[in-house]
Amino acid sequence: MRIVRFSPNSSAGLGSDPLFGVLNEQDQILVLRGDPIYSGIVPTESKVALADVRLLAPVIPRSKVVCVGKNYADHAAEMGSDVPKVPVIFLKPNTSVIGPNDTIQWPRMSERVDFEGELAIVISRICKDVPAEKVSDVIFGYTIANDVTARDLQKVDGQWNRAKGFDTFCPLGPWIETEFEPGSQKIITTLNGEIKQSEPLSSMNFKIPEIIQFVSSVMTLLPGDVILTGTPAGIGPMPAGAEVVVTIEGIGSLSNKVSPRAN
């Protein structure tokens, strides 16, 4: 099931506030009542065509975005590091979240902004100390993320909060796929149509059960929290005006453009 969050056109007669819906194979959206993470899947009688809406980030984390670093061996190597023995985690603020086709804003203080395509987990309920064998009980679904990074600032600071925390630095979308099962599906990132990253999700060092078990042992997870699971090798800079597309087989594609560099 594909859960979308969208802004309807005025002609749809659905008001102006963002809504949630279920996208079917005919590109029709069945409008839902409330936020399905909190209210469950409660359909209304309204339908709208996908072509008549603007898709938004499918989830707006009310609490946090948790990220796993260096979770692919080849990416750790390209960063000059070994694969960590336990997950390396950090936070992106929820204010960094944007949706599909939104613009990544180049911050004034950075000269290099990189893409990092990733699989993202959406948490369904309050949970703490989740056993690995029970993680499916707390997963609402999966979406696609781009862990945008001001690489020059990351090197200067020696830690990652500023480099990864700017507004617009966490594109999510285009929807949440509730029936996705991570396995050998490829994650592919293109920059202006050229493939830059291409690797199966099975190459993750720490798999989904280990990630949720570890993160929930550190902090309480809340409904709508998002966990980014790490990026494969091939990261690189996004020139001003570039278009970056992250695709995961079985979910879809997340496309964003980069603004001109701020003066």
Image (spheres, rainbow, N blue to C red):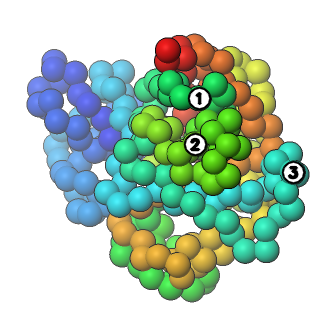
The residue sitting at 17% across, 36% down in the picture is 17
User: Which residue, given by chain and number where applicable, does mark 2 sit on?
Assistant: 163
Asked if labels 2 and 1 touch by Cβ distance under 8 angstroms, the answer is: yes
Furthest residue toward front: 156
> Mark 3, residues whose alpha carbon is within 10 Å: few (<14), some, or many (≥20)?
few
Label 1: how many Cα within 10 Å (few below 14, some 14–19, many 20+): some
State the residue position of label 1: 110
Q: Quadrant of residue 252?
A: top right
Query: In terms of image quadrants, where is residue 69?
Result: bottom right
**Which residue was labeled with disc 3?**
80
Circle nearer the viewer, 3 or 1: 1
Q: Which mark is residue 149?
A: none
Query: Could you tell me residue 110's position as x and y percent?
Result: 59, 29
Element assignment for label 1 = loop
| Residue 103 visible to the viewer | yes
Q: Are marks 2 and 3 in contact (CB under 8 Å)?
A: no
Identified by mark 2, the residue type is Ala
- Real-space Cα distance between discs 2 and 3? 18 Å
Q: Label 1 vs label 2: CA separation?
A: 9 Å
| Residue drawn 54% across the image and 82% down it | 217
Q: Nearer the viewer, residue 176 or 261?
A: 261
For numbered disc 2, what is the local secondary structure? helix
